[in-house]
């Protein structure tokens, strides 16, 4: 391939810029040209495409968000949208594309690959919910942000002998909630993958009260939801003043951690190596510390296990 494109799509994630930088630098080192595509698949449809050189990605490795902007593009889910995108690829001589995003973005990448524009996906989402990889760009930064925010809530909960019920992101998945819950020493972690009865949460709080515990943190994955309702139930059943907090989009921003920058750089390098060999319709991922790649269709049909052992560790250590 002589010319490849790069885009970021779906929800942004800290570390996406490091991946863009890596894609551009690797491709140029291999003798290719690189086009930046703004706002995900919308940029392909609207012909918002521009040249990237080695210096155009300077000073972005440490920045959150994505310099290529991102979007959810309903138009790309239509035949007309895909046809326009393919026409614009041809117009700019784009022979392959690196798509940085979540599983929705990979469905788009599969569609484009089937239309003759080979794509390679890089997992980028704070949710870490992509089955073919142990790690997705943004997860570590988001976990650390959530942990820091909950540490602050702990201060005020402790001062007031209160309970804090905190919602963290993750869409339908509880991976962010689980790790964050362990890191903040939450009394209970509620995730969509494990059915938890409110009575059990309340019993646990009451039991801890008997051993002199006076303030509590409950982490709730957004896939479980209704933190206000949960807070009311806890306050009513235990008599402990309880406040609900939704951390929200603060978890999506900020300077990427070391882990996010390094993984993003490795993923970007690996994705370009594939396109350079003419290989598309793949997703790169991390398995036991090694980078692997998978057929997009297979990747989308894999199931990610929930770590029940870690869930048990969280439960035992928070008595
Ligand atoms: P994420 O990539 O974070 O999972 P979305 O699910 O919103 O985010 O997907 C991002 C974009 O990928 C969508 O807005 C759409 O443009 C594209 N996309 C998602 N599903 C499909 C599909 N089945 N066919 C074509 N494009 C898709
Ligand atoms: O997929 C990342 C994510 O932040 C999810 O955790 C959350 O459910 C969703 O995106 C929020 O999407 P939006 O930015 O469109 O509100």
Image (spheres, rainbow, N blue to C red):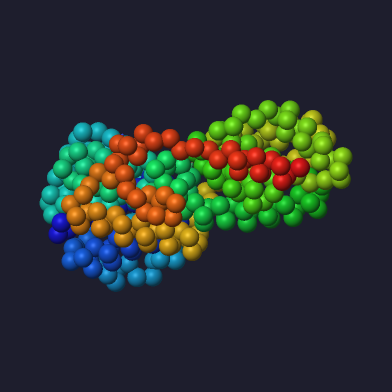
Question: Could you tell me if residue 285 is visible in this image?
Answer: yes
- Specify the quadrant that holds the N terminus: bottom left
Task: Tell me the residue at 39%/58% (across/down).
Answer: 264
Residue 96 vs 300, above or below: the answer is: below
Image-based side of 216 in relation to 175, left or right: right
Task: From this view, report whether residue 13 is shown above or below residue 166.
Answer: below
The structure residue drawn at horizontal position 46% and vertical position 53%, both measured from the top left corner, is: 138
- Image quadrant in which you'd find residue 219: top right
Residue 45: percent from left, percent from top = 22, 45
Q: Position of residue 260 (x, y in %)?
A: 46, 58
Q: Residue at x 58, y 38 (%)?
A: 308
> Is any atom of residue 246 visible in this view?
no
Residue drawn at the location 84% of the way across and 40% of the way down: 209
Classify 220 as above or below 159.
Answer: above
Q: Percent x, y for residue 147?
A: 62, 53
**Residue 241, image quadrant:** top right
Q: Residue 107's spot in the image, x, y percent?
A: 31, 38
Of 60 and 261, the residue lying toward us: 261
Q: Nearer the viewer, residue 284 or 128?
A: 284
Q: Quadrant of the C terminus?
A: top right
């Amino acid at each position: 391939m002589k010319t490849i494109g790069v885009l970021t799509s779906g929800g942004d994630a800290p570390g996406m810029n490091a991946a863009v930088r890596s894609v551009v630098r690797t491709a140029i080192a291999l003798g290719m040209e690189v086009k930046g595509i703004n706002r995900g698949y919308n940029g392909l449809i609207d012909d918002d495409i521009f040249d990237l050189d080695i210096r155009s990605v300077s000073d972005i490795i440490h920045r959150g968000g994505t310099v290529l902007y991102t979007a959810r593009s309903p138009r790309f889910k239509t035949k007309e949208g895909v046809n326009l995108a393919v026409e614009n690829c041809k117009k700019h001589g784009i022979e392959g594309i690196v798509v940085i995003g979540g599983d929705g973005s990979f469905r788009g990448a599969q569609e484009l690959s089937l239309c003759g524009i080979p794509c390679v996906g890089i997992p980028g989402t704070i949710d870490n919910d992509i089955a073919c990889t142990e790690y997705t760009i943004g997860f570590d930064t988001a976990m650390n942000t959530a942990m820091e925010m909950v540490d602050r809530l702990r201060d005020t909960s402790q001062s007031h002998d209160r309970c804090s019920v905190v919602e963290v992101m993750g869409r339908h998945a509880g991976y962010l909630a689980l790790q964050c819950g362990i890191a903040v020493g939450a009394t209970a972690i509620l995730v969509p993958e494990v059915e938890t009865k409110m009575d059990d949460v309340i019993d646990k709080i009451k039991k801890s009260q008997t051993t002199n515990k006076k303030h509590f943190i409950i982490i709730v994955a957004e896939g479980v939801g209704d933190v206000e309702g949960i807070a009311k139930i806890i306050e009513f059943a235990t008599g402990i003043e309880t406040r609900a907090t939704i951390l929200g989009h603060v978890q999506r921003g900020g300077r990427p951690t070391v882990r996010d920058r390094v993984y993003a750089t490795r993923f970007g390098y690996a994705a370009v190596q594939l396109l350079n060999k003419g290989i598309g319709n793949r997703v790169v991922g991390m398995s036991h510390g090694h980078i692997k790649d998978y057929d997009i269709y297979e990747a989308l049909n894999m199931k990610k296990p929930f770590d029940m052992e870690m869930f048990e560790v969280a439960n035992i250590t928070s008595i």
